[in-house]
Amino acid sequence: MTLIWKFAAAAGLVLGLANAAAAAPVKTAHVALELVAQSRGITPGGQVTVALSQDIQTEWHTYWRNSGDSGAPTELTWTLPAGWTAGDIVWAPPTRQPTGPLMNYGYAGKVLLPVTLTAPKSARIGDAVELKAHASVLVCADVCVPEDADLTLTLPVVASAPEMDPVNGPGIATALEMSPKPGFAKAVFTQAGKTLKLAVFGEGLKGADVSDSYFYPYAADLIDHGKPQLIERGPGGLTFTLTPSPGKEDGPVAAAVEGVVIVAGHAFEVKAMPGALPPEASGLGPAQAKPTSPAGGDLGIFAAIAFAFVGGLILNLMPCVFPILAMKAASLAGHAHDRKEAQAQGLAFLAGAVGTFLALAGVLIAVRAGGAAVGWGFQLQSPPVVAGLALLMLAVALNLSGLFEIGSSLQGLGAEAASRGGLAGAFLTGALAVVVAAPCTAPFMAPALGWALVQPPLASLAVFFGLGLGFAAPFTLVAFIPGLLARLPRPGGWMEGFRRLMAFPMYGTAAWLAWVLAVQSGSDALARVFAAAVILALGVWLLGSAQRRAGLGQRPVKSLILGAALTIAALTAAIWPNYAEPAEAGSTEARGSSIPYEAYSPEKLAEVRATGKPVFINFTAAWCVTCQVNEKVAFSTRTAAEAFAKSGTVYLKADWTRRDAVIAEELARHGRAGVPLYLVYPAGGGDPVILPQILTGEMVAGALETAAKS
């Protein structure tokens, strides 16, 4: 009998070891539930970690210990042999599960929730102990379904420390290691009305990337879960700005603020008491989430230069450059049959364009090094610069119309030299073309500039040199190709008519810049630049009159002095820097579009994304011609308007017409130095899709349809 008993005990032990790792999972409609053990047995009086395994159906989720605005946490009710005890669930770090305007916390995919079980000392070696638990889970997608399962796990009682279960042990060990634990960082909080600030700091947070950090409170009624959590960086930590739960705005929210903080993928517990916020947890500005693959982020210097060169070539096709190039075409036509003169002018234009690109780049690099958030096209973010350029274009147009002449071939200030010759005129034409064209960004140009602006100065300047070469190449090459020059008509009386015709694109450019100024600073600024334009016109008319009288042998000194004084007064009045923000800023309709929009801010983006809706962000500016073309060609179409309405996409507009550091930082985060930039955030979360810089209504509609389904 003794032998039989020993054989039965051994058989039971073997059977228990075989079943120790797991019992058969129970599959409900949307989740497979199972009890699994970390080790293949337990000693008398010892402990074993058993985990509830949840394998959740795609697009469904279960809930954390604090489910957030809705839902319910998973519950385990144990039925254990006498003397056995079960600890609390060790909750894995949760993820956000937005549902409409609500924010919930839970799990998707597969998750392990460990529990420590303790055996009594009286447990008999060789016994196979049956452990039972009733699991209640709420599984949600668009609807929520409560699901239950009765689970069983059999473990043998063994004499010595059991080995780890080879199937489930490593996963449970990892779950325990990754579970939030106290002691990693310190925390304090303050409350002032509707603002709750939670500062988290410690040695482990020095230099940490806090961009995607989040605070998950243990108490369901501590904060308004649906409101965005703003983050301010510090040298040794971060500070969350939270919204207290409704009804607790006047405080106190709690005697202590407890929960889980996730920073750079590391989860830890905090228990914050009221206190002064430490300086190491703030002071470095707001945290911005990093893109997973910023445009231009992987370019090397040679690829960036090549992209810049191609972008410069394409930049010649942008509408903002047409007037300047048309003006220079008149000059080239006048010298088409003087090969040496044409080549000299081509090289001078090249030098003017490349030199101005490098000068603008140098200023931009210096300003950014000083801490200012500016980007490409920064010169047209200044209303005085826009006003001055508008008057300059008007003066060029009046010169081309024959109202006055400018000697010494100062073609960049007028256009007389452009039609008569002069290397200085060609040089200044190249410079003027760059100043007007720079606000535009062409395909290939955007990623190159985005890469350049985060590189050392020499690498940045090399990229801008490539951009200048590409921009000037067409005009310069034409000057060096005899076959093309030979096809141009010979100089003659037709040139005077052509010159006057070229004045009208310049009038259009002046009008466009005046409109940009009105967008930046309102109707008062427009009235001011119009008054300056009238004074300027009078001044240059007096100059022209004096020039004509001088041609007749007269000495019109008074007319020259008065004309010059009026011209200087007009320019001074236009560029005097006292422009205000426009009164109409903050409209709820996009300029040139019937699609309702809201102003972009990082807080607004976070708030909208929490609702689970797709988001379209239009980074634009009034001075960006490509942006305005897209407004007409893409956003003002019925196709785009219907796509926004059908998909429920929220349209946010980031207007960079005036300087805005927040928008500049967001552009840089996506590898861009200028506008336009179009981002589409999918409804289901994740990184945004970057659309091309030149759009159609159909492209917008297709992107929104995809985002709504994602």
Image (tube, rainbow, N blue to C red):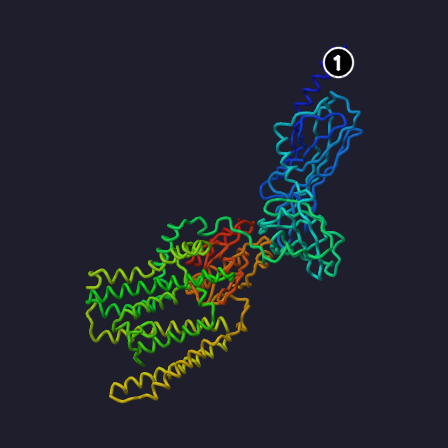
- Give the quarter of the figure containing the N terminus: top right
Across the whole image, how many numbered discs are drawn on residues?
1
Given residues 435 and 28, the one toward you in this image is 435
Given residues 276 and 433, the one toward you in this image is 276
Given residues 127 and 141, the one toward you in this image is 127
Q: Quadrant of residue 267?
A: top right
Q: Is residue 694 left or right of residue 706?
A: left
Quick check: 259 above or below 320? above
Instruction: Name the spot of residue 39 as percent of width and height, x first.
Output: 67, 28
Instruction: Name the spot of residue 574 as percent of width and height, x first.
Output: 45, 77
Residue 29 visible at all: no
Amino acid type, label 1: Trp
Quick check: 581 above or below 545? above
Q: Quadrant of residue 365?
A: bottom left
Residue at x 70%, y 20% (from the top left corner) = 13
Dot 1: few (<14), some (14–19), or many (≥20) neighbours within 10 Å?
few
Residue 676 visible at all: yes
Residue that numbered label 1 is attached to = 5
Residue at x 33%, y 58% (from the top left corner) = 470
Q: Quadrant of residue 393?
A: bottom left
Residue at x 65%, y 23% (from the top left corner) = 18
Given residues 421 and 128, the one toward you in this image is 421
The local secondary structure at tag 1 comes to helix
Instruction: Name the spot of residue 692 as percent of width and height, x first.
Output: 43, 55
Instruction: Name the spot of residue 534 as percent of width and height, x first.
Output: 41, 82
Q: Is residue 660 left or right of residue 231?
A: left
Q: Is residue 681 left or right of residue 568?
A: right
Quick check: 475 above or below 518? above
